[in-house]
Amino acid sequence: EGRVEVYYNGDWGTVCDDGWTDLAAQVVCRQLGFSGPAVLASEGDYAAGQGFILLDDVACVGTELSLLDCPHSSWGQHDCSHAEDLGVRCSPESNTVMDGSLGPPLRLVDGESTKEGRVEVLLNGQWGSVCDDDWTDRDAAVVCRQLGFR
């Protein structure tokens, strides 16, 4: 977890948090090698950066492999101060699947171990519970496979 910085033309600089969502945070965390859930930090959670503010108006949808694959304003063009530096919290949770090719990200929460719990899905940047109406063992088996269990 921490303030997000990017390297461009020999300089490190911060990223403005304008328009960011948890889906965009997911891109940053995935690029850093984390597979668990990602969330934006609140403004002021981390020390303000110094020097350049390199990116603003970054518009990730969550499926990009790199922050630089997301549309953004021109390098160095911004309307921000360092009070708006982007921060993210990444999680390496193994009970979460973030591979978009399998559908929306899933996780298990509130279980006694990482292998049990209530099923949640990440949709539009928010985690929510899956309703159990008409839920069968077959549905549970699909979730378990998607989470890497056999």
Image (cartoon, rainbow, N blue to C red):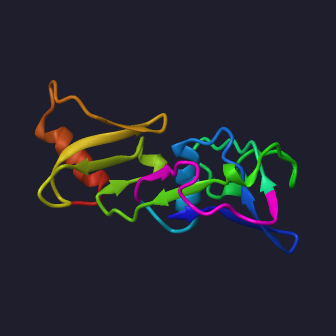
Above or below, comparing residue 21 to residue 41 in the picture: above
Rendering coords of residue 20 (x, y %): 62, 42
Left or right side of 75 for 35: left
Residue 8 magenta:
no
Residue at figure coordinates x 60%, y 41% from the top left = 61
Residue at figure coordinates x 48%, y 39% from the top left = 125
Q: In the picture, residue 118 is in which quadrant?
A: top left
Residue at figure coordinates x 73%, y 60% from the top left = 14
- Which residue range is magenta in the image? 36-53
Image quarter of the C terminus: bottom left
Q: Nearer the viewer, residue 95 or 82?
A: 82
Q: In the picture, residue 148 is in which quadrant?
A: bottom left
> So how many labels did they put on this image?
0
Left or right side of 15 for 97: left
Q: Nearer the viewer, residue 129 or 134?
A: 129
Left or right side of 86 for 144: left
Q: In the picture, residue 136 is in which quadrant?
A: top left
Residue at figure coordinates x 34%, y 62% from the top left = 93
Q: Main secondary structure of the magenta part?
A: loop
Above or below, comparing residue 108 to residue 123 in the picture: below
Rendering coords of residue 88 (x, y %): 54, 56
Rendering coords of residue 37 (x, y %): 41, 53
Rendering coords of residue 59 (x, y %): 69, 41
Residue 48 magenta:
yes
Residue situated furthest bottom in the rendering: 10
